[in-house]
């Protein structure tokens, strides 16, 4: 089972939050209007000899965790760019580190990417300088979390959905809706688990989008005050039924296997781990309402000290073989379409729906909420990520 490797990663590096998930805390997202003008690299120069990387654990392995897992040293051998890796535990930490201007590139999740764009910390990316960008799955390109007005601000890396997992021996009948975790009458009070991050407010908004159409929610990350307050109220109601909020997915595994949790938000890799362990029987589904999810993006700093090595890293990390290695090791769908043609990738790509656009279309990928409504409304002001962070503190109490 591929997911087994992920536990090893977490144990070795003290992973607090898996790379995909990861955001909490407060930093400004800006107004969501036009981003500051930042120059885009127009051509590559002579490699500067090194590149400073901020990454989720498992995204830039150099063999120190597992000697057999190393795509950093081959990069250095091929380009002459030494890789200095800083592993970050949260999206907030990534944003803070990037603002020091000491780093070149970052593997940002959708709850950080627009913060980096609108603060002028990240530069637009010249995709012509990244040859492997051409074969990235098209449905991951030029999306709301990795571009602005058609300008790419990063290279898609890997993605996944936030699924509904349940213990099949306890939760009956089998749920088909997020209602099992949001409705006040849930018979599983005290054994419901939820993701611990302000971005989880979008999960409540998604549920309301389908169950209370009168609220007019069109995008779970674009909430005016009335819509936002409705989502917050639902989460405050849900809190009475939640037994555990998780951000470290190894704890989610433990909670399900111990019986502490029987239903709630999960990732495919968590489901794989529990299924492999065979301590309890679980199933994970994409509910009728769809789900939220993540699509991580490699971004370049506006003041990158080593721009040529940065672009060479971007091209290397999404090359077919390397992107396949990362996706397998980390436990996610690769963004590179040719990765699914690599040896032993058939099961990985099938399990994580890597080439499945209809499946991807059911996912609302994490996107940093901004005051400018991301659903296109110009007659309303939406709640930005700072307000989401404040509300999340109130929800958890």
Image (tube, grey):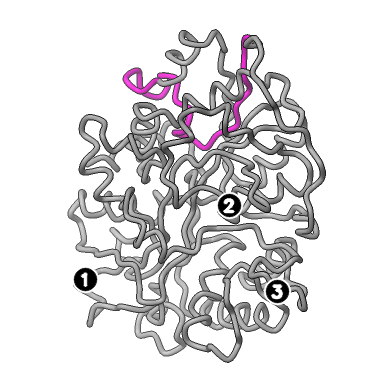
Q: Classify mark 3: helix, strand or loop.
A: loop
In the rendered image, the quadrant that contains the C terminus is bottom right
Q: Which residue is mark 3?
A: 377
Answer left or right for 108 relative to 270.
right
**C-alpha gap between disc 2 and disc 1:** 32 Å
Position above or below: 340 against 352 = above
Write the residue at 55% across / 50% down.
Answer: 22
In the image, the segment drawn in magenta is: 49-70
Q: Which residue is mark 2?
A: 110
Write the residue at 55% across / 83% down.
Answer: 237
Name the residue nearer the viewer: 113 or 265.
Answer: 113
Name the residue nearer the viewer: 357 or 381.
Answer: 357
How packed mark 1 is, by other alpha carbons closer than 10 Å (few <14, some 14-19, many 20 or more), is some
Q: Earlier in the sequence, mark 2 or mark 1?
A: 2
**C-alpha gap between disc 3 and disc 2:** 21 Å
Q: Classify mark 1: helix, strand or loop.
A: loop
In the rendered image, the quadrant that contains the N terminus is top left
Q: Which residue is mark 1?
A: 168
Q: Is residue 59 magenta?
A: yes
Q: Earlier in the sequence, mark 1 or mark 3?
A: 1
Position above or below: 80 against 180 = above
Q: Are marks 3 and 2 in contact (CB under 8 Å)?
A: no
Q: Are marks 2 and 1 in contact (CB under 8 Å)?
A: no
Q: Quadrant of residue 178?
A: bottom left
Q: Nearer the viewer, mark 3 or mark 2?
A: 3
Q: Classify mark 2: helix, strand or loop.
A: helix
Which is the main secondary structure of the residues drawn in magenta? loop
At which x and y percent is residue 311? 59, 25
At which x and y percent is residue 337? 35, 40
Q: Nearer the viewer, mark 2 or mark 1?
A: 2
How packed mark 2 is, by other alpha carbons closer than 10 Å (few <14, some 14-19, many 20 or more), is many
Write the residue at 57% across / 71% down.
Answer: 220
């Amino acid at each position: 089972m591929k997911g087994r490797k992920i536990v090893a990663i977490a144990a070795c590096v003290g992973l607090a939050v898996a790379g995909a998930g990861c955001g909490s805390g407060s930093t400004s997202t800006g107004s969501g209007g036009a981003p500051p003008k930042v120059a885009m690299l127009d051509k590559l120069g002579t490699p500067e000899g090194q590149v400073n990387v901020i990454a989720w654990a498992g995204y830039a392995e150099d063999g120190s965790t597992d000697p057999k897992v190393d795509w950093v040293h081959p990069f250095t051998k091929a380009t002459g760019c030494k890789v200095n890796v800083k592993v970050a535990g949260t999206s907030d930490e990534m944003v803070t580190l990037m603002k020091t201007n000491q780093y070149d590139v970052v593997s940002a999740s959708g709850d950080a990417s627009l913060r980096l764009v609108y603060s002028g910390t990240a530069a637009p990316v010249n995709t012509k300088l990244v040859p492997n960008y051409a074969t990235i799955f098209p449905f991951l390109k030029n999306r709301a979390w990795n571009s602005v007005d058609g300008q790419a601000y990063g290279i898609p890396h890997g993605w996944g959905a936030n699924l509904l997992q349940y213990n099949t021996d306890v939760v009956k009948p089998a749920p088909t809706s997020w209602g099992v975790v949001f409705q006040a009458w849930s018979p599983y009070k005290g054994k419901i688990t939820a993701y611990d991050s302000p971005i989880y407010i979008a999960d409540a908004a998604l549920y309301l989008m389908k169950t209370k159409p009168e609220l007019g929610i069109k995008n779970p990350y674009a909430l005016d005050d009335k819509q936002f307050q409705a989502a917050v109220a639902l989460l405050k109601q849900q809190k009475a039924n939640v037994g555990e909020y998780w951000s470290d997915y190894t704890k989610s595994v433990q909670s399900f296997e111990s019986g502490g949790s029987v239903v709630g938000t999960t990732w495919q890799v968590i489901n794989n781990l529990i299924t492999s362990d065979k301590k309890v029987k679980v199933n994970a589904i994409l509910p009728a309402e769809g789900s939220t999810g993540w699509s991580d993006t490699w971004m370049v700093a506006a003041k990158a000290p080593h721009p040529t090595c940065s672009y060479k890293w971007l091209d290397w990390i999404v090359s077919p073989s390397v992107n396949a290695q990362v996706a397998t090791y980390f436990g996610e769908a690769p963004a590179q379409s040719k990765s699914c043609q690599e040896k032993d990738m058939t099961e990985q790509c099938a399990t994580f729906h890597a080439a499945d656009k209809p499946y991807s279309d059911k996912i609302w990928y994490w996107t940093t909420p901004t005051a400018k409504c991301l659903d296109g409304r110009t007659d309303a002001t939406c709640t930005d990520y700072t307000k989401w962070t404040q509300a999340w503190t109130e929800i958890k109490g």
